[in-house]
Image: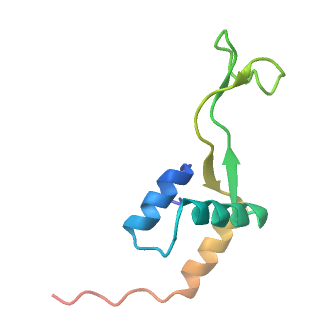
C-alpha cells in the first residue's frame, strides 16, 4: 500500500496471497482493514461521485448518486509514521555474496 497508493480490498487480498501473508479469506482481510481503519492506520475513499449530468462532487453537495465501484484503502499519516518506525527497527539484510 505504501508504494502503490490506494488499493481495493480484492487487490490487497490478492497481493497478500501472492506474498504468502497468512490471510485466511476475504472476510479476514476486511476485518484486518476495519481494525486498521479503527486505529487510524488506513483510510477509505469512495468511488468517484458524479451526478447524472457528469458533475463531480455531486453526492457531497446532496445531488446525484454515488458512482459504482469499490472503496479503496490508503495509508494515513499516522500509518506512514508507524511503517517508518517499523522500518527503522528492522536490521537491513546482509549483503549478497557473489
* Left or right: 15 as drawn, with respect to 81: left
In the rendered picture of this protein, how many numbered marks are placed on residues? 0
Here the colouring is rainbow
Q: Position of residue 75 (x, y in %)?
A: 63, 58
Q: Is residue 4 visible?
A: no
Q: Nearer the viewer, residue 55 or 64?
A: 64
Q: Is residue 93 above or below residue 65?
A: below
Q: Is residue 90 above or below residue 30?
A: below
Rendered residue at 64%/13% (across/down): 54
Residue depicted at 75% across the width and 20% down the height: 58
Identify which residue is drawn at 55% across, 79% down: 87
Q: Position of residue 56 (x, y in %)?
A: 68, 21
- Along the viewing direction, whichever of 52 and 25 lies nearer the viewer: 25
Asked whether the viewer can see residue 13, the reply is yes
Residue placed farthest to the top in the image?
53
Name the image quarter holding the C terminus: bottom left
Residue 25 vs residue 10, the one in the foreground: 25
Residue found at the very far right of the displayed protein: 62
Q: Residue at x 60, y 29 (%)?
A: 68
Counting from the top left corner in percent of width and height, residue 61 is at 83, 22
Say above or below: 23 vs 86. above
In percent of width and height, residue 38 lies at: 78, 63
Work out whether 56 lies above or below 96.
above
Quarter of the rendering containing residue 94: bottom left
Amino acid at each position: 500500500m505504501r508504494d502503490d497508493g490506494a488499493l481495493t480490498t480484492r487487490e490487497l487480498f490478492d497481493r497478500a496471497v501472492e506474498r504468502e501473508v497468512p490471510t485466511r479469506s476475504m472476510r479476514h482481510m476486511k476485518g484486518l482493514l476495519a481494525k486498521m481503519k479503527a486505529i487510524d492506520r488506513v483510510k477509505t475513499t469512495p468511488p468517484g461521485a458524479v451526478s447524472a449530468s457528469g458533475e463531480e462532487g455531486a453526492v457531497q453537495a446532496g445531488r446525484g448518486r454515488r458512482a459504482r465501484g469499490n472503496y479503496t484503502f490508503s495509508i494515513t499519516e499516522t500509518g506512514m509514521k508507524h511503517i517508518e518506525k517499523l522500518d527503522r527497527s528492522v536490521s537491513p539484510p546482509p549483503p549478497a555474496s557473489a
